[in-house]
Amino acid sequence: MSSDIRLAFAHPSERAEATSGGELRDRISLRDHIREVEIGAFQQERGTLQRICFNVVVEVQLPELTGAGGVDDDVDKILSYDTITEAIDRELQAERLNLLETLAAKVAEDILADPLAARVFVRIEKLDRGPGALGVEIVRDREMLRDVAETAVEVAPLVAFLGNDVIGAAELGKALDALEASGAPVILCVPVGGEPAPKAKHPAAQRRIDLLALEQNAWVLAALDRRCVVVSTRTELDWAMKHGQMSVWAPSKLVLDATDGPETDTRDAAALAEWLAGEFDAARVVSVGDMAHGAGEVLSFEELLNSAPLLG
């Protein structure tokens, strides 16, 4: 077996040693750390826990030397093993993911947030999907993530829940103008349209049907004004906010993938809008239209058009 093939299947610690450069670095590792999680892109992987195994190696800067070549025996000056396990915990709790590749990248980025970490090898394997272990391995270093960190921007959106009377109004464009005048990126949320959603006998199936009914109405709104771009993922919403784009939220993916999702009935579109606002630290939440129950402050169509900028 060639050296390259052997290293391809070797533990990440061997790969780290084989690919090390001229700079001396220490390494700490986590081996065979097994967790039971819900992960996977296939429908049969939803609602089911499966075992995944983590092997992680972190290259760190050499500790400061003291005295006659000794080391400073101070736990506060080293990268703790807890840095690795806590990074795994945070990323598993943040949201349900479809891909091991995504989870590995998030764990690596989390670890590299520690200033002592220089390079990270992450191998993750599914233990229950076949006769062997199915997995991925990635390597990330601080330089690879530097540009991402420098361009990261925290933006607080305006979340607006629109009633069907507003969506169907001839002056919809004026309502969108008023929302845009806030100066913040706008995320629009919608209720179910005029036609009731079909009924299913199983709660999980009904939950999906209810969410899809909201998404159908999101596309109705998108067809009425080109500013209304339907988005479904956290990445799409982050991008839209950073670029000042108005979005219409299609809720299925975020709601179904959330590890700590909304406890409300998925037919309560206003409550889902408030949950989304909390997830993205919205600057303000308003509802516009003729409704008794809404998200945040309820404004009539006329009140919106005649009000000062909502974030002014």
Image (cartoon, grey):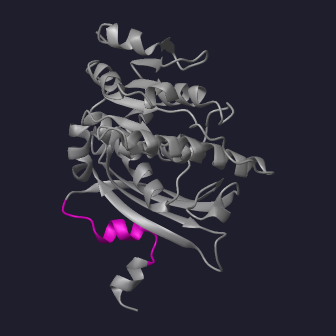
Magenta residues span 9-22
Percent from the top left, x then y, of residue 276?
Answer: 50, 31
Q: Which of 293/237 is in front?
A: 293
Q: Residue at x 22, y 45 (%)?
A: 146
Pick the quarter of the image with the C terminus. Answer: top left
156, above or below 248, in the image = above
Name which quarter of the figure residue 45 lies in: bottom right
Q: Residue at x 40, y 54 (%)?
A: 105
Q: Residue at x 66, y 41 (%)?
A: 196
Residue 172 is one of the magenta-drawn residues: no
Work out whether residue 115 can be spotted: no
Q: Which of 43/70 is in front?
A: 43
Name which quarter of the figure residue 169 lies in: top left
Q: Residue furthest bottom?
A: 1
- How many discs mark residues in the rendered view? 0
Work out whether residue 43 can be spotted: yes
Classify residue 115 as left or right of residue 294: left
89, above or below 128, in the image = above
Q: Which of 275/246 is in front?
A: 246
Percent from the top left, x then y, of residue 193?
Answer: 56, 37
Pick the quarter of the image with the N terminus. Answer: bottom left
100, above or below 252, in the image = below
Percent from the top left, x then y, of residue 172?
Answer: 36, 27
Q: Which of 48/160 is in front?
A: 160
Q: Residue furthest front?
A: 170
Classify residue 220 as left or right of residue 203: left
